[in-house]
Amino acid sequence: MAEILFFSAVNGITYGMLLFLMASGLTVIFSMMGVLNLAHASFYMLGAFFGFEISRHLGFWPGLVLAPLIVAVIGMGVERYGLRTVHKHGHVAELLFTFGLTFVIQKLVEMVWGKLPVDYLVPPSLDFPAFTIFATEYPAFKLFGLLASIAIFLALMLVIKRTRIGLIVQAALTHPEMVGMLGHNVDRIFMLVFGVGVGLAAVAGVIAGPALVTQSNMAGLLGPILFVVVVVGGLGSLGGAFVASLLIGLVQTFAVAFNISLADVFGPVAADSGLALYLDDIWSVTVAQVAPVLPYLLLVLILIFRPRGLMGNRES
Amino acid sequence: MLEVRDLHAYYGKSHILQGVDLSVGAREIVSILGRNGVGRSTTLKTIMGNPAPHGSVVFKGSEIAGKAPHQIARLGIGYVPEERAIFPGLTVEQNLVLGLKPGQPEGVWSVEDTFRLFPQLRERAHAPGGALSGGEQQMLTICRTLMGNPDLIMIDEPTEGLSPQMVERIGELLQEVASRGISILLVEQKLAVAMRISHRVYVMGHGRMVFSGTPAELTANRAVREEWLEV
């Protein structure tokens, strides 16, 4: 039991921190520009594929640095020449633009790398067990992913809380127009934030690529969860995104680890009561089986009982 | 200092400004009066570049219509919006510091000036801006804009919703601002305040100016007051 708890907790936190790398960019972009970037997970996928391609020629570590940089530059280009132009036509146009972008990126990835998973491997320098506990080895690469995410989180917080540009970004979260009227070039800040945001998603891609599966459907798999994180945390709240990322990460890994069904819990008590018959359809469904649904269930509950999210500032 | 000629502005299809002419001279306090919805706030916003101006806006000798808001701000026009737009999560001090423009040297107005004039803001220097009272927020937003060292400051309804004592303090602040050589373009609902501190006043009606003159001339002109100001 202690073993399950420990590994579920560590895996949950690792997964949660990866989610946060993506959710942080998404939520900051949303609050500043009012754009829900549907293509955010696509940049995560680009990060993984670029990382894979670079790792074949230069090794994993150059990929970890270069892939996010390339994705950040692409992101800035998308903001400068795509979103900014579309912005004039309102939020629906922006939404459709990022929606279309997901297909463009997916098709491009399929054209270049195909639809099958690519062979993105854990680098040899991290391919060993970090520690052994309860007779189970914990891979060093996962531990590296966790530490890297925490380091980036701390660096991000430091930049936002301690630097002038961070101050401007914080101000622009609530009143972007006023920031412009005080003489700050908000357009340039937007471009920078968009670039850094999708760059962080790409870092998550490079870290997740070897640990999970690098395939052209990885954006589609992760995208919906990302929106759950941002809505549950509260649109525009970095702290909320952090809490929600960890929450979703832990909920998913813990749920998968438990093979308990209603039958196991109430079986002896309810055997004769007809309850088992009444709930026949879900009576022996285990928690592990419903694990994929849980984040969306949480989303629905949050939208009903706390529409602004756990720590959101906005009503929308 | 500021010369606006035949200025038009649109929100979607509505033609809000229909040929506004106005001017503000160096060290002058000018007020725009008029009923709600005649386009006074829009006039200030259009001078700042959003909504897009159609017409001529000349500031310190150069045309600024068509420039972005941050460029206009850097040229020396400060703008204080009616909704105040305090950054609620940032402290009073951080709000003030954000008024400094990129690479700007010390201006005519400092954080210390703000605190000297409004000791209650000094006490709350590290409190979040969102926790201030309406009057304190109004002082903060004006001082924040002053930090950017403007030659002209445009202030939209600074006394709206404030207690009589607060209105008095805002009046003192505006006098202090003027005494430092900064021109003021004021949109004001409270006639008494505007008439007392302004050198010249405009009365606006239906998207254009319908009267221009000194406060004394407006007081004497009963027809204009009855048609455009009194309810």
Image (spheres, coloured by chain):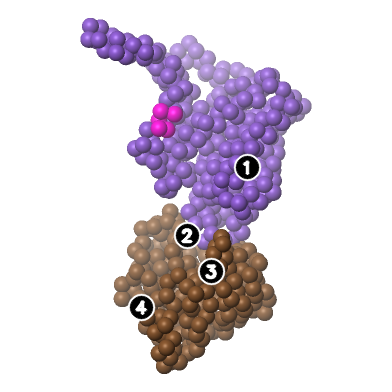
Give the mark toward the camera: 1 or 4. 4
Give the mark toward the camera: 3 or 2. 3
- In this view, A233 is above or below B133: above
Q: Main secondary structure of the magenta part?
A: helix
Residue B184 horizontal side relative to residue A305, left or right: right
- In the depicted view, which residue is nearer to us: B212 or B112? B212
Q: Are marks 3 and 4 on the same chain?
A: yes
Disc 3 designates what residue?
Answer: B16
Badge 1 sits on which subunit?
A: A
Residues at marks 4 and 2 touching, judged by CB atoms closer than 8 Å: no
Q: CA distance from mark 1 to mark 3?
A: 31 Å
**Residue A86 % position (x, y):** 64, 49
Name which residue type carries label 4. Answer: Val
Name which residue type carries label 3. Answer: Ile
Query: Which numbered disc flags the more N-terminal residue, 4 or 2?
Result: 2
Q: CA distance from mark 3 to mark 4?
A: 21 Å
**Secondary element type, mark 2:** helix
Residues at marks 3 and 4 touching, judged by CB atoms closer than 8 Å: no
Badge 2 sits on which subunit?
A: B
Chain that is purple in the image: A
Disc 1 designates what residue?
Answer: A97
Disc 2 designates what residue?
Answer: B94
The image quarter containing residue A29 is: top right
x 47%, y 35%: residue: A229
- In this view, B107 is above or below A74: below
**Residue B194 % position (x, y):** 42, 82
Badge 4 sits on which subunit?
A: B
Instruction: Chain B: give its colour.
Output: brown
x 43%, y 81%: residue: B228
Which region shows up in magenta? A296-300
Query: Which numbered disc flags the more N-terminal residue, 3 or 2?
Result: 3
Q: CA distance from mark 2 to mark 1?
A: 36 Å
